[in-house]
Amino acid sequence: MMASIKGVPICKACCATNNNHRHCYYYSKQIGLSESGSRNLLNLRVQNKWECRLGGVLTKTQTATTPVEENDKPSVDGNGETQITEARGFHRDLQSLPSAYSEAAALKAYPKCETVPCDEFEAVFKAVELWLVDKAVLPIENSVGGSIHRNYDLLLFHRLHIVGEVQLVVNHCLLGLPGVRKEELKRVLSHPQALDQCEMTLNKLGVTKVSTNDSAGAAQITAAERVRDTGAIASVRAAEIYGLDVLAERIQDDTDNITRFLILAREPIIPGSDRPHKTSIVFSLEEGPGVLFKALAVFALRNINLSKIESRPQRYRPLRIVDDSNKGSAKYFDYLFYVDFEASMAEPRAQYALAHLQEIAKFLRVLGCYPIDTTL
């Protein structure tokens, strides 16, 4: 689940509120190269009725208008693996809210915040845009599972700003009903990525893997069904919320399992130079030999380190026809390139690099400039 504090397999998105502000974790609004990105964040006062829970959308404490559907039934995908589809949208039933790693990421960034749950990444972005929450926290990549492509696409389609990042060590736990031993389990529920990351442990147990929309949602289903031979892979926090026992901790195949989350807001932060910063951009290029090399060289020439590069096909121009021979037309994909580089927009070298890149790129957008998270 997501949240303006919540998560996906890894986690989706989350929101948070402290005593004076509501904080939702969403993503970044596009700012042109000519914009300074120095607009002040709005200080929104919030009444006590607003709470941020795990998951991804904000909710009111006095209402419980959209509970999770109870009649969702499992289905079987083409691979023979069971899937459970949960209700979509925002969670407003505060007695049955899921919690996962996104909430932990939100609390790491804002220790006194309250979080709001969302079922879908898209809902997290909309919650921030609709002023339901202040910021959004949602996962962007995992050291084992790789990038979350859906969120890269949403960063482009929505006009939010990246204002921070959070790195979180993932501790996958095997959960079960009180008094159950792990040897009694016959099926285990979780997000597909969590199931994949714990494949060795699950194979040793000989259990059936059941896919759900979210790891915290798997814990919720396990607690609600009360079937002794059913367990879930989720966080310790999910076990606490849903009254489950932790049958085993750190069951992931790779112990160095880290998820990186982005913090999104409606307005950018003022870039600083007092601490290490990272800037995230997206651009596209014309077709031609060495064009990508030239684009990336603008950073190397100024001794700027690139920490991430991701390519995504353009959805509205997937193919390009190029007459490069007399044998007919060749087809190429048009790509967008997402790049994170380690420099602040307050530094002249970053400004010169982007000005240089703008001469080469046919499209360029700055997604955000924010402090680097160096803690785990």
Image (cartoon, rainbow, N blue to C red):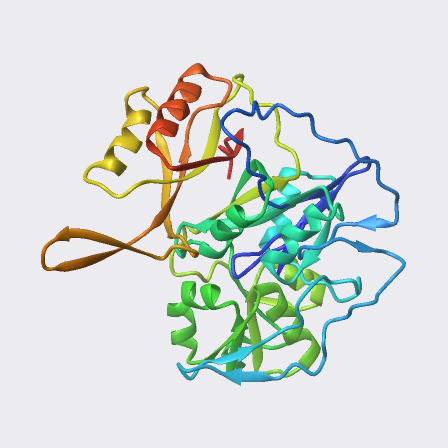
- Please say if 167 is above or below 346: below
Quadrant in which the N terminus appears: bottom right
Q: In this orientation, does residue 206 appear?
A: yes
Q: In this orientation, does residue 258 appear?
A: no
Closer to the camera, 284 or 94? 284
Q: Residue 40's image quarter?
A: top right
Q: How many marks?
A: 0
- What residue is drawn where x is 73% and y is 48%? 130
- Please say if 330 is above or below 196: above
Please provide percent x and percent y for residue 96.
75, 67
Closer to the camera, 338 or 205? 338
Closer to the camera, 50 or 352? 352
- What residue is drawn where x is 88% and y is 43%? 47
Q: Residue furthest left?
A: 326
Please provide percent x and percent y for residue 88.
66, 68
In this rendering, position of residue 305 left or right of residue 170: left
- Please say if 237 is above or below 203: above
Closer to the camera, 170 or 136? 136
In this rendering, position of residue 145 left or right of residue 177: left
- Please say if 171 is above or below 82: above
Q: Residue 181's image quarter?
A: bottom right
Please provide percent x and percent y for residue 322.
22, 52
- What residue is drawn where x is 63% and y is 50%? 125
Please provide percent x and percent y for residue 360.
32, 31
Q: Residue furthest front?
A: 326
In this rendering, position of residue 113 left or right of residue 283: right
